Amino acid sequence: MKIYYEHDADLGFIQGKKVAVLGFGSQGHAHALNLRDSGVDVRVGLRPGSRSAARAEAAGLRALPTPEAVREADVVMVLLPDETQGKVYREEIEPNLKEGAALAFAHGFNVHFGQIRPRRDLDVWMVAPKGPGHLVRSEYQRGSGVPALVAVHQDASGSAFPTALAYAKAIGAARAGVIPTTFKDETETDLFGEQAVLCGGLTRLIQAGFETLVEAGYPPEMAYFETVHEVKLIVDLIYEAGLRGMRYSISNTAEYGDYTRGDLAVPLEETKRRMREILRQVQTGEFAREWMLENQAGQPVLEAGRKRWGAHPIEEVGARLRAMMPFLRARVLEEVG
Ligand code: NDP
Ligand code: MG
Ligand code: MG
């Protein structure tokens, strides 16, 4: 597989163009600010009077109502919540989009599952950073980047791929590596990864460890440091040096416990059997249908989940301990507190 780096991408494909970034959330703020700092002509499309519009203006960007931003643009990057994109596309994007413009995404969900069926005259491509937006911004600022996937769904102009690559370079992704893929593969691997490992899997592993210690009578503060706080320190080692590098860095005692007890906590074959079921529901579109119904119903399961998991004791002890670590503040989302 060819991985693209800075020298493979020509910023010329994006620098002459007017780019509209729709949304100023996790990904939106990072793309818009990185593009601007890379010398790209960027405006942000938002709901007038929204909190995001105020934040974009405070960051020194031009914030316009979505239809106006789209009308000006040669490239429209859609960084709205996935569940809103279909409606906003039909009502505010497509009717205002220039003939032959490029429509871009950071996730293939809506195109792959048929919620957006783009006009034939458009280029349609994706630059999907493999990391949260706040890292896309902070890594760019320190001269590095978050890797990204690129894919072309429709190439009306004949230059969709080099333009996507130039966009990836402008947000800093080509410093880390840009991997070519398809909308289908990006969508399926992204959904699987967040459900099985990154979000669903990891939070359950942390929670199980925390609860086991607390239920056995250990102080929650100790349980928090051991099963939550330290995760980052271990993951940082894996990020920099792989699993083997992490295992090199930990004590021999920890390494022996890893090899001999890890399977007791997470039985490998059984876990894979369950993960294949998660993957099947993603591939068949079962998950996508369920998520769209959830949105038609006003997100009741999402709301219930936020209430239930947000009230877990791990949150109370965590908030208290993090408040004692002021060095954490700089990298935490202001709105989470
Ligand atoms: P967020 O929820 O963080 O941000 C959404 C933004 O869209 C906000 O600025 C919000 O503004 C605005 N918005 C919401 N509804 C509308 C609307 N109807 N009209 C105009 N603006 C609206 O989104 P994310 O950054 O998490 O996700 C954006 C895309 O990036 C998705 O496709 C996602 O899959 C993808 N992605 C996200 C990652 C992440 O790190 N979060 C990682 C990789 C890809 P306001 O409510 O203030 O009006
Ligand atoms: Mg995702
Ligand atoms: Mg230890």
Image: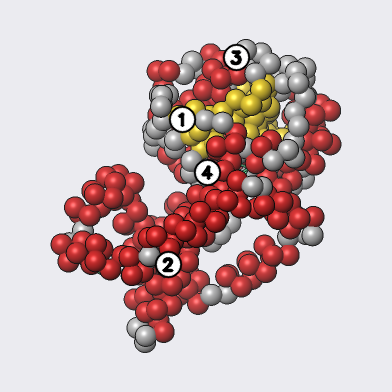
Give the quarter of the image for residue 29. top right
CA neighbours of label 3 inside 10 A, class few (<14), some (14 to 19), many (20+)? few
Dot 1 beta carbon under 8 Å from ligand 1: no
Q: Which residue is mark 4?
A: 189
Q: CA distance from mark 1 to mark 4?
A: 13 Å
Which of these two is toward me, 65 or 262? Answer: 262
**Side of 283 relative to 257 (left or right):** right
Comes first in the chain, label 3 or label 1:
3
Amino acid on which the number 2 mark rests in the picture = Ile
State the mark number for residue 206.
2
Give the residue displayed 43% in from the left and 72% down from the top: 208
Give the residue displayed 35% in from the left and 83% down from the top: 218
Q: Which residue is mark 1?
A: 179
**Side of 229 relative to 307 (left or right):** left
Give the residue displayed 48% in from the left and 25% down from the top: 169
Amino acid on which the number 4 mark rests in the picture = Thr
Residue 23, image x and y in percent? 67, 40
Which of these two is toward me, 224 or 207? Answer: 207
CA neighbours of label 4 inside 10 A, class few (<14), some (14 to 19), many (20+)? some
Amino acid on which the number 1 mark rests in the picture = Ile
Residue furthest left as drawn: 252
Is any part of residue 8 visible from this angle? yes
Residue 143, image x and y in percent? 39, 33
Q: CA distance from mark 4 to mark 2?
A: 23 Å
Depicted 187 relative to depicted 265: above or below:
above
Q: Which residue is mark 3?
A: 159
Quadrant in which the C terminus is drawn: bottom right
Depicted 171 relative to depicted 13: above or below:
below
